[in-house]
Amino acid sequence: MASALMAAGPVQAAPTAPPAEAATVSHVQNQDQAALDAYWTPDRMKNAKPANTINSGWAAEGRSVLPKAGEQSVAKAPKEPAAETRATAQTTVPRIGKVFFTQGGQNYVCSGNSVQSGNQSVVATAGHCTHDLATGWVTNFVFVPAYNNGAAPYGKFTARSLVSTSEWVSRNDISYDGAFAVMNTLNGKTLAATVGASSIGFNMARGLTYSAYGYPAASPFNGERLFSCYGKASADRIGGTQSQGIPCDMTGGSSGGPWFVGSGSTGTQNSVNSFGYNTQSNVMYGPYFGSSIQTAYSTAASR
């Protein structure tokens, strides 16, 4: 049974096909900076639920489906991870931060990273942190770079546009669980000018070694610090997705956090934290950054 970072849910029939307009891959956000600054108080940020499950739109015959974001897992607690799978606490990285948003009237949290683009304003995150088949595009979307124990040292960047893959938006295909947010300027400066930006790569070799970062918020973590895992990627031999897995015990809230090629946070970003299986302890999967996710990125980078 698969889940976004270790939660699990009941088996259900595949949903009916979404309406044609659901294939839209981008959404304009028109929310005021002052209003979102006021909305995302320290208490709201601290109490936002980890987006540790994706919606039940991802389904295929004979495959388990997932509960909507925020529902409780029915899986047994995972076994104590081996030392090499444990996420380690990190000092903050200006480019990496937390993503906050509202979906279906509930506040949620994911992770994200500033990536290089012509507009200097793009954040990479997971598709399930931007869109849900049942509720549509999320609202109140902000990116807080270098979040640490409630502190927002670079402020809260608001989104002017959200972009995901057509495969994710139309049917929640977990293989394409990537998305990008185009951020507004803050204090007259772009996101990249404020915190820097990582290089980003597409259609790279499979089986690379990655450093994955994020803010895991589901137990045993609390979402207040940045963590990282490191390991060689392997194919998904359980669910047959195109995603790759690395050894890692990060939980919900780390969704959307960046995967960097090599050791540390200075490499090229080439995936994001996406999901895990409750039948396979301590493996984190991330989507392969192929042509579809590259198209979503190109759309965001041109806005």
Image (spheres, rainbow, N blue to C red):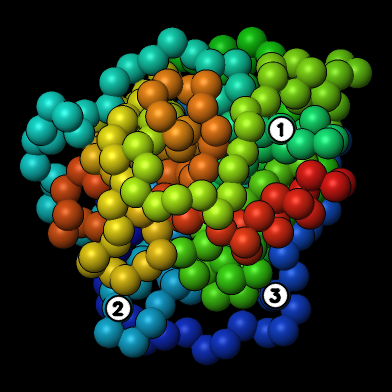
Residue furthest to the right: 188
Instruction: Please identify the residue farthest to the front as the structure is shown.
Output: 205
Does label 3 or label 1 sit earlier along the sequence?
Answer: 3
As shown in the figure, which amino acid type bears the numbered disc 2?
A: Arg
Residue at image coords 16%, 48% = 281
Q: Which mark, by number, is residue 296?
A: none
Image location (x, y in percent) of residue 235: 30, 58
Crowd class of label 1 (few under 14; some 14 to 19; many from 20; radius 10 Å)? many
Element under label 1? Answer: loop
Q: Could you say which disc has been placed on residue 23 in the image?
A: 3
Q: Position of residue 290 (x, y in %)?
A: 56, 58
The 10 Å Cα crowd at callout 3, few under 14, some 14 to 19, many 20 or more, is some
At a point 51% along the width and 49% down the height, the residue shown is 204
User: What is the C-alpha distance between the residues marked 3 and 2?
Assistant: 23 Å
Is residue 296 depicted above or below 34 in this figure? below
Indicate the amino acid at tag 3: Ala
Q: Is residue 284 visible?
A: no
Residue, disc 2: 63
Task: Describe the element under mark 2 as helix, strand or loop.
Answer: loop
- To which residue does mark 1 refer? 116
Q: Position of residue 146 (x, y in %)?
A: 57, 17
In percent of width and height, residue 12 lies at 33, 81
Q: CA distance from mark 3 to mark 1?
A: 26 Å
For label 3, the SS is: helix
Left or right of 3? Residue 141 is: right
Residue shown at 49% from the left, 70% from the top: 173
Is residue 153 at all visible to an observer of this figure? Answer: yes
Q: Nearer the viewer, mark 3 or mark 1?
A: 1
**170, 55: nearer the viewer:** 170
